Every structure is written in structure tokens, then in C-alpha cells.
Amino acid sequence: MKKALTTRPLAGLALTIAALTLTGCAATASSTGGPVAGSSPSTTPNATASTSAAPATDEASVSAVLTSAGLQGRSTAEVVAALEASTEDRTKGPAGSVRYDQLVLTSADHKVAMPIPAGQFYLSIAPYVTKTHDCYYHNLATCQGELAGKQVHVTIADAAGTSLVDRDVTLGANGFAGFWLPRDSRATLTVTYEGRTVTQAISTGKGDPTCLTTLKLV
């Protein structure tokens, strides 16, 4: 599991969450969860999100957003880790939407994107027992899973059977655990928790979800 980073004060960054929640975690919990990776989602990304203005990628705009959030100078992976770990003002705190090849950050004044490291794909999972929610692109500010702080065992093996992950993982305060996986690949994910288990096929291609909330432990 990634090493948690110490987050800096996040006050002063008034963020626009609405655009991101169209494709991020839904506000209403469900018992069935969201789309299975590699399959047609139950809630596809809203057309409004895909037709809105493209995020800026220039250094000055990105730097302005990161500086406002106290994250200046950090890499994409470090920003993801910091926002994933932060529980400070989750409704107004830094909004980051993880996509196939970009981390999209939205503030009151800017919508910017940082590149996901080449060849990598960030998948955040929230296994559950009784309560879940629909999710497609992981929202680092609003997504909340059921088993916050619980320890689970996670294994991920690629299509050839090579082990990518095999370790105990403590779910974050948001109930999620994130993994950097090879991009454009297929794998099998298994989560075990207190005698319960779930196995699901996953894929990391363009258009696949970065947020997995369909992992019902039985």
C-alpha cells in the first residue's frame, strides 16, 4: 500500500465539486454498487463533463492550484496520495478526479490536469459488506467507502498469473485503497476480510473506471 503523505493545510481553496461528481462518487448509496471494470457502467460519465472546457495543462495554471492547496512541487502520484489520505473538509477540500491518463483538479478559478505517469493506471477500491455507492472516476474529495480503517488482504494477478499485489492493506479514512497498476492490462483482483472474500476481473484501459465499489464481501 502506498505510503501516506502528511497533508498541508488546505484552507483557502474554494473548490467546485459539482462538475466532478458527475463522473465521480454518487451521493446516494446503493446495495448493488457501480460498474464492473471493463463492463458497461450503470452510471456512465455524464455528457456534460465530456463536453465542458478541457482542463489547462500549462505549468503556471497547475502550479497555482497546487500552491493554493499547499501541494506545490509535488508529482502527480504524490498529489493523489495526499488527497486520498486527507480527511480535512472533505466536502470543500481539494477535488481531484482520477482519469485514465490525467488527474483533473478543479478549483473556483481553475480546472487543470496533471499527467498520470506513463504506462501506469490508478485504481482505487472500496470493498464493502452492506453499503456501497455508484462510482466511475474516483473523486479524491467526496468518495466514501464503508470499511474505513479496516484491514483487508488484497491480491492482484495479471492475465498471465503474475502477482502484482499480495499484501495486507489498511483502508484509508475514506474507505478506499489505491493501487498503481500497469496501464492497458487485464487482471484478477481478490479481497479478503474477516472470513469474507470477493474476486473480480479488472482492466486498466482507456474508458475503464478508476473507482471500484462493486466488491461485495461474502
Image (cartoon, grey):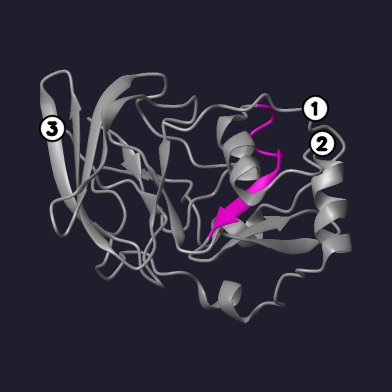
Q: Is residue 126 above or below residue 188?
A: above
Whether residue 177 is visible: yes
The residue type indicated by label 3 comes to Thr
Mark 2, residue position: 70
- Report the side of 116 relative to 71 (left or right): left
Q: Which range of residues does the magenta coloring cover?
A: 88-98
Q: Is residue 176 left or right of residue 71?
A: left
Classify residue 147 by image quadrant. Answer: top left
Residue, x 80% and y 27% (percent of image)? 9
Q: Is residue 68 left or right of residue 161?
A: right
Q: Secondary structure at mark 2?
A: loop
Q: Are marks 3 and 1 in contact (CB under 8 Å)?
A: no
Tag 3 residue: 197
Q: Residue furthest bottom?
A: 51
Q: Which residue is mark 1?
A: 9
Q: Earlier in the sequence, mark 1 or mark 2?
A: 1
Image location (x, y in percent) of residue 156: 23, 44
Kindly report which numbered mark, 3 or 2, lies closer to the viewer in this rendering.
2
Residue 30 in picture, x, y percent from top left: 31, 45
Dominant SS type (magenta): loop
Q: Residue at x 42, y 46 (%)?
A: 28
Check disc 1 and report its element: helix, strand or loop: loop
Amino acid tagged 2:
Gly
| Residue 154 image-quadrant placement | top left
How many neighbours does mark 3 have within 10 angstroms: few (below 14), some (14-19), or many (20 or more)? some
> Sequence order check: which comes first, mark 3 or mark 2?
2
Badge 1: residue crowd in 10 Å (few <14, some 14–19, many ≥20): few
CA distance for labels 3 and 1: 38 Å
| Mark 2: few/some/many CA within 10 Å (<14, 14-19, 20+) | some
Query: In the image shown, does 18 or 120 lie closer to the viewer?
Result: 120
The CA distance from mark 3 to mark 2 is: 39 Å
